[in-house]
Image (tube, helix red, strand yellow):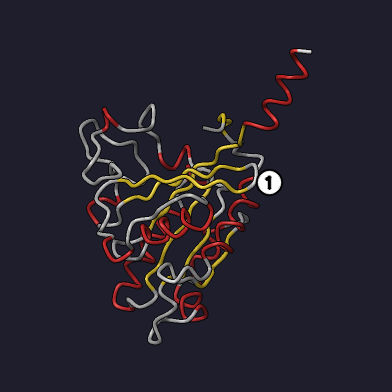
C-alpha cells in the first residue's frame, strides 16, 4: 500500500525539472523574455513593468511549469566582461542574482543550494538576438559561436530567438540565418530552431517555450532533476 501511495504521490506532485540558460548580448531582451514567459505560464504571477527592466548584471532566476515539466531559467548578463562567466560557476562573493524587490544576491545567499556550473548543468539554451542591432550582429555571432562549440553543451538543444520583430526596421529571419550560416556545422545534430520573437508583445514566447520543453524531455543524454511541487 505504501509503495502504491508513494508512486501516486510522485505522479501527482513531482515535476521533472530542467535548467535553461538564457544567453545573448546585453539589451537583447533576455529579461523581458523571461518576464513574458512567467506571465504566460504562471497563472497568478504578477510581473514587473516591462518598462522598468534594466540590464542584467549577474543572474536573474525564474521558473515556469509546462505540464509535468518545470523549467528553471538562468538569465545571465550579456555584457562583454560577463560573457566569460557563462561557462563557469560563480566566484565567491560575485553578485549573481536579484531579489524580487531589487538588488543583487551574493552567492552565499543565493536561492540555489550550490553555485551551478551553468553549461554542464543546463538542459537547454535560449540565445536571444536583438534583430534591430545590425551593428553588433557580428559581436553576437562571435558570442554564439564560442557558446555553441563548448564541449560542455554537446547535444544540448538551442533555441535562437530573433527578438524585437515588432520593429519595422529589424533584420528578418532569413537575414539572421544568412549571417549565421557558417555556424551550421558547429551546431551539429542537436535540436536547433531559429524563431521570430517579440519579447515586448509576447509574440513567439509561448511557441518557443513549448518547443524547448519537447526537446529537453526527449533528450536522454541529460536527464531531468525531480522536485516536489511547492
Residue 176 placement (x, y as % from top left): 46, 76
Residue 7 vertical placement versus 27 (above, below): above
Q: Residue at x 49, y 64 (%)?
A: 160
Write down the quadrant of residue 36 in the picture. bottom left
Q: In the picture provided, is 195 more to the left or to the right than 199?
A: right
- Number of marks present in the image shown: 1
Task: Report the front residue among 150 and 85.
Answer: 85
Residue 97 placement (x, y as % from top left): 29, 42
Q: Residue at x 44, y 77 (%)?
A: 165
Q: Residue at x 75, y 15 (%)?
A: 3
Residue 75 placement (x, y as % from top left): 37, 50
Task: Report the front residue among 196 and 105.
Answer: 105
Residue bearing mark 1? 218
Farthest residue in the bottom direction?
168
Q: Quadrant of the N terminus?
A: top right
Residue 171 vertical placement versus 216 (above, below): below
Residue 173 vertical placement versus 96 (above, below): below
Q: In the picture provided, is 77 more to the left or to the right than 226?
A: left
Q: Secondary structure at mark 1?
A: helix
Q: Residues within 10 Å of mark 1 (few under 14, many from 20)?
A: few
Q: Residue at x 54, y 69 (%)?
A: 195
Q: In the picture provided, is 140 more to the left or to the right than 214?
A: left
Write down the quadrant of residue 144 in the picture. bottom left
Q: In the picture provided, is 91 more to the left or to the right than 120?
A: left
Task: Report the front residue among 151 and 227.
Answer: 227
Residue 59 placement (x, y as % from top left): 31, 46
Task: Report the front residue among 225 and 10.
Answer: 10
Residue 67 vertical placement versus 79 (above, below): above
Amino acid at each position: 500500500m505504501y509503495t502504491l501511495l508513494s508512486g501516486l504521490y510522485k505522479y501527482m506532485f513531482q515535476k521533472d525539472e530542467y535548467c535553461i540558460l538564457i544567453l545573448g548580448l546585453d539589451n537583447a531582451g533576455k529579461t523581458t523574455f523571461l518576464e513574458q514567459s512567467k506571465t504566460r505560464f504562471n497563472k497568478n504571477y504578477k510581473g514587473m513593468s516591462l518598462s522598468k527592466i534594466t540590464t542584467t548584471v549577474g543572474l536573474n532566476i525564474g521558473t515556469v511549469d509546462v505540464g509535468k515539466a518545470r523549467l528553471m531559467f538562468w538569465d545571465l548578463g550579456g555584457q562583454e566582461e560577463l560573457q566569460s562567466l557563462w561557462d563557469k560557476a560563480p566566484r565567491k562573493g560575485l553578485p549573481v542574482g536579484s531579489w524580487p524587490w531589487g538588488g543583487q544576491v551574493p552567492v552565499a545567499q543565493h536561492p540555489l543550494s550550490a553555485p551551478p556550473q551553468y553549461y554542464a548543468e543546463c538542459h537547454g539554451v535560449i540565445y536571444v538576438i536583438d534583430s534591430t542591432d545590425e551593428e553588433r550582429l557580428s559581436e553576437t555571432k562571435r558570442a554564439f559561436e564560442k557558446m555553441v562549440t563548448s564541449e560542455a553543451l554537446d547535444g544540448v538543444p538551442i533555441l535562437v530567438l530573433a527578438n524585437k520583430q515588432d520593429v519595422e526596421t529589424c533584420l528578418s529571419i532569413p537575414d539572421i540565418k544568412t549571417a549565421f550560416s557558417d555556424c551550421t556545422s558547429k551546431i551539429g545534430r542537436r535540436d536547433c530552431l531559429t524563431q521570430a520573437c517579440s519579447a515586448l508583445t509576447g509574440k513567439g514566447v509561448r511557441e518557443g517555450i513549448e518547443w524547448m520543453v519537447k526537446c529537453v524531455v526527449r533528450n536522454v543524454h541529460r536527464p531531468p532533476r525531480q522536485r516536489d511541487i511547492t
